[in-house]
Image (cartoon, grey):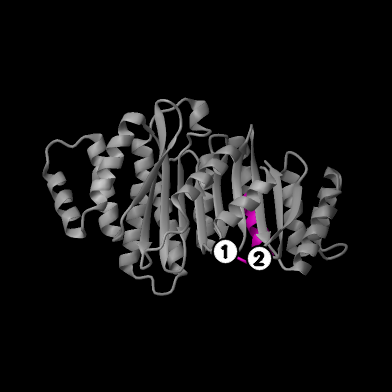
Amino acid sequence: MELSTVHALYDALAGDRLSFLYSGLFHDEHTARLIALGEEFLEQEEGADKSLRGKLAFVMVEAYQNIIRHRAQLSAELAQGRGCSMFLLRSGTAQHQISAINPVNGADAGKLAAALERMNGMDVEQMKQVFLRSLKSEERSERGGAGLGLIEMARRSGHALRHGFAELDQAHRLFALQVLVGRSAVWQGELGQAFELHRMAAEEGVAVLCRGRLSTGEQEVVLRIIERDLDVEPQRSDPRMRAFLAATELLDTLEAKGDGPMIIMARKGEHFSLTMALPLANAAAEQFTHVVTEVMAMDAPGLQRRYRDILLGRGEPAGTLQLGLIELAKRSASALRLDKRTWRDMPFVTLEAVL
C-alpha cells in the first residue's frame, strides 16, 4: 500500500471507537459475522440495551444484503477497481453509522433517488403503513424488495437516510446509502467523505480495515471474515492467517495512543499486504523502530536462529515484540516496510508485510 494513504485512512476515521471497512468478496455467510461484530462491540458499550442491539443488527444485515442482492454486474476489472462495493461501520459512544456503496445501473439510479426522497418526507407512522401495504401487495419486484428494506431501515433506525451518487461509467453509477443508529442524529462527516474512503480503498485494493481497540471477540469475528475471503487459495491461506494473528498480538503488546491501532488487509497483485499502523508515545515509537530495524537487517537463517533462541530463552530477552516481528518477517514475500510520521503531535508508525 501507499503508506501515505494509510495515514490518510487513519485520519479520515478519527473519533471513531471502532471502524470496520469491508470491500472483499461479499460472501453471504458474512452476514452472521457482521451481527456478531456488532454484538461484540456493544458488549463493550455501557448502556447498550436490547433494542439498540436489534436495530444495529437489522441495519447492518439489510445494508450488507442490499449490496449482495442489488449491485449491478460489472466487468471483472471495474468490479475489482473503481466499481467495487464497500460496507463501512463507524461506531462512536452514542451512535453507529453504517455506509453501503455499490454500483447500480443508470436506469435504477433515478428510481432510487425518487424513492428515497419520498421516504425521507414521511414520518414513522407513514413509513409503517407503506411497509404494510407493500407486504400485502401481490406484485413485488426485485427493486420493490429493495424499497421495503430501505423503508424498514429508516423506520427502525428512527433517523432519515442519507444517500448520494457518483459517476462510474456511461451505464453505471456508484450508489451510497448511509444509516444512523443510536441516540445521536449527527452524521460523522459529509457524504462525500464516504466516497473518498471508497476511492482510497478501491485504489489500494483494501479488503478489510479495522481501526480501534478490538476485544478478543471482535478479533475473532474479523479473523473469520478474512479467513473466508482467503480460502480461495488454501495453500496461502494458513500462512496469511498466522501473519494476521501475529500482527494482532503485536498490536496488543504495543500501547497505542489516540484512537487505537489500525490493521488492513489489501490485495496486491498475486499477494496480500498486511499493514498495521498506530500512534505511539515517543519512547515506545523509538523502541518499536529500533526493533523493526534490527529484524529487517537479519537474513532468513538469522531470523530462524533468533526465533529459536527467543523460544528457548537464550540470548538477550526480547519478549513478544521481537518474536511477533520475526514471525511477520519470516512470512513476508518481500522485506518489511516501515514508515514513521506524525499524527496530532504523536509519532505514527506503519509496518507492512506482503503475504
Camera-side residue of 266 and 129: 129
**Which residue has dot 1 on it?**
213
Q: Secondary structure at mark 2?
A: loop
For residue 245: magenta?
yes
Camera-side residue of 330 and 58: 58
**Which residue has dot 2 on it?**
256
| Residue type, label 1 | Arg
Picture coordinates of residue 72 (x, y %)? 38, 31
| Residue type, label 2 | Ala
The CA span between labels 2 and 1 is 9 Å
- Whether tag 2 and tag 1 are in contact, CB under 8 A, the answer is yes
Camera-side residue of 11 and 263: 11
* Quarter of the N terminus within the rendering: top right
| Quarter holding residue 281 | bottom right
Specify start and end residues of the magenta stretch as a single range: 244-258
| Quarter holding residue 176 | top left
Q: Secondary structure at mark 1?
A: loop
Question: Badge 1: how crowded within 10 Å, few (<14), some, or many (20+)?
Answer: some
Q: Along the horizontal axis of the image, is 250 left or right of 129?
A: right
